[in-house]
Image (spheres, helix red, strand yellow):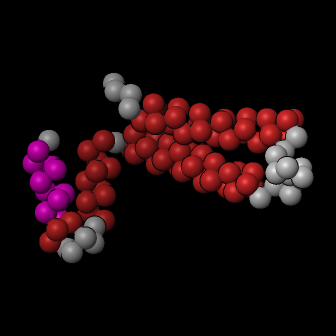
Amino acid sequence: MFHIYYLCISFIYNDFVKVKWRVYSHYLSSIGVWLSVCTLLMNMIYQGFSIGSNYWLSAWSGASSAAVNGSLEPSERDMYLGVYGALGAGQGKMTDFSLLKK
């Protein structure tokens, strides 16, 4: 395991942080196609939750239906809070899933 790590780091260092395709193919052949696809898919889902929560927080903070005192109606506030919480829970589940071991 250490040899693979050293080999990959030396490729990256020697190419001035430009990773060659043979490094990626080495990773792919080491862990297999199935785990590589799962890793990419889970990373994309995690990033989707992250971007979604940032977008939703921006929409929430710019809600034009704020009352005179600057607060939202309880039903609208609960809707924004529920969706934001669900997106955060999705991020947490993806993090939990990434930490699972065989």
Is residue 65 highlighted in magenta? no
Question: Vertical placement of 78 versus 68: above or below?
Answer: above
The picture places residue 13, in percent across and down from the top left corner, at 16, 68
The picture places residue 89, in percent across and down from the top left corner, at 59, 33
Which residue reaches farthest bottom? 16
* Quadrant of the snapshot with the N terminus: top left
The picture places residue 98, in percent across and down from the top left corner, at 42, 35
Main SS class of the magenta portion in the image: helix
* Quadrant of the snapshot with the C terminus: top left
Residue 100, picture quadrant: top left
Residue 80, picture quadrant: top right
The picture places residue 86, in percent across and down from the top left corner, at 66, 35
Residue at x 34% of width, y 27% of height = 101
**Residue 52 seen by the camera:** no
Q: Nearer the viewer, residue 11 or 69?
A: 69
Residue at x 25% of width, y 53% of height = 26
Range of residues picked out in magenta: 2-11
Is residue 9 highlighted in magenta? yes
Question: Vertical placement of 83 versus 26: above or below?
Answer: above
Q: Nearer the viewer, residue 2 or 83?
A: 83
**Residue 63 seen by the camera:** yes
Whether residue 74 sits left or right of residue 38 in the image: it is right
Residue at x 85% of width, y 35% of height = 74
Residue at x 84% of width, y 45% of height = 72
Q: Nearer the viewer, residue 100 or 57?
A: 57
**Tally of marks:** 0
Whether residue 38 sits left or right of residue 20 in the image: it is right
